[in-house]
Image (cartoon, grey):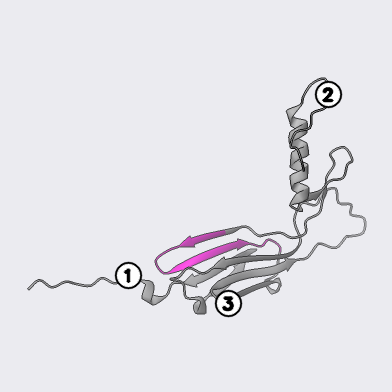
């Protein structure tokens, strides 16, 4: 990609939206979101992999990681901790074509995914536990006891 904006001396007017659409299409193609079709702006989605959305929160006792995994079975999700890295991986299978059903658009991603998170220094990776309900994975990562602040009383004498 040598230039971001093409100049055509035969154009009567410059349309910034045409250039923006072309740039968006090129970027989407480059990142594997969509492939260029050359058929007048129609798009063909080709998602090689996807990444579930994640929220991470913390309180005094633990870190909580919530991952959205809609319409996935618990058996299709794996959770591992190794070398201070928490890995959530799995696969969402594509719905099989049903006879008489014609898809007009498919935007929900399917296929394999992997999310990796380095454990904070105060986390105890040996005590990780998780629960899964209604497409929401919740990973509880307890903080180690030694990391909790201790209050020490000072005696004046």
Q: Name the N-terminal-most of marks 1 and 2.
A: 2
User: Residue 9: which disc?
Assistant: 2
Question: Considering only order in the chain, which callout, 1 or 3, is on the residue closer to the N terminus?
Answer: 3
Contact, mark 3 vs mark 1 (Cβ under 8 Å): no
- In the foreground, 97 or 151: 151
Which residue occupies the extreme front position in the image? 2
**Quadrant location of the N terminus in the rendered image:** top right
Percent x, y of residue 148: 36, 71
Residue 148 as seen in the image, left or right of residue 32: left
Residue at 75% x, 33% y is: 5
* Residue 108 drawn above or below residue 23: below
Q: Position of residue 153 (x, y in %)?
A: 19, 72
Residue 39 in picture, x, y percent from top left: 89, 40
Q: Nearer the viewer, residue 76 or 98?
A: 76
How far apart in space, not on screen, are marks 1 and 2 (Cα)? 70 Å
The answer to whether mark 1 and mark 2 are in CB contact below 8 A is no
**Of the residues tagged 2 and 3, which is closer to the observer?**
2
User: In the rendered structure, which segment of residues is drawn in magenta?
Assistant: 55-71
**Label 1 sits on residue:** 149
Density class for disc 1 (Cα within 10 Å; few <14, some 14-19, many ≥20) is: few
Residue 150 in the image: above or below residue 53: below
Distance CA(mark 3)–CA(mark 1): 27 Å
Residue 30 position, x and y percent, is 76, 50
Q: Secondary structure at mark 3?
A: strand
* Numbered-mark total: 3
Residue depicted at x 89% and y 52%: 102
Mark in the foreground, 3 or 1: 3
- Chain-order first, disc 2 or disc 3: 2
Vertical side of 149 occupied by 29: above or below: above
Residue 42, quarter of the rendered image:
top right
Residue topped by disc 3: 82
């Amino acid at each position: 990609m040598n230039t971001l904006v093409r100049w055509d001396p035969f154009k009567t007017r410059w349309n910034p939206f045409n250039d923006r659409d072309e740039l968006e299409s090129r970027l989407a193609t480059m990142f594997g979101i969509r492939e260029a079709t050359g058929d007048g702006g129609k798009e063909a989605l080709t998602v090689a992999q996807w990444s579930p959305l994640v929220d991470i929160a913390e309180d005094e006792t633990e870190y909580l990681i919530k991952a959205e995994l809609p319409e996935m079975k618990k058996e299709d999700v794996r959770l591992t901790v190794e070398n201070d890295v928490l890995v959530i991986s799995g696969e969402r299978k594509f719905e099989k074509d049903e006879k008489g059903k014609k898809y007009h658009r498919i935007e929900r991603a399917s296929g394999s995914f992997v999310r990796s998170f380095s454990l904070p220094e105060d986390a105890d990776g040996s005590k990780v536990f998780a629960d899964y309900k209604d497409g929401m994975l919740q990973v509880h990562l307890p903080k180690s006891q030694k990391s909790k602040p201790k209050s020490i009383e000072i005696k004046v004498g």
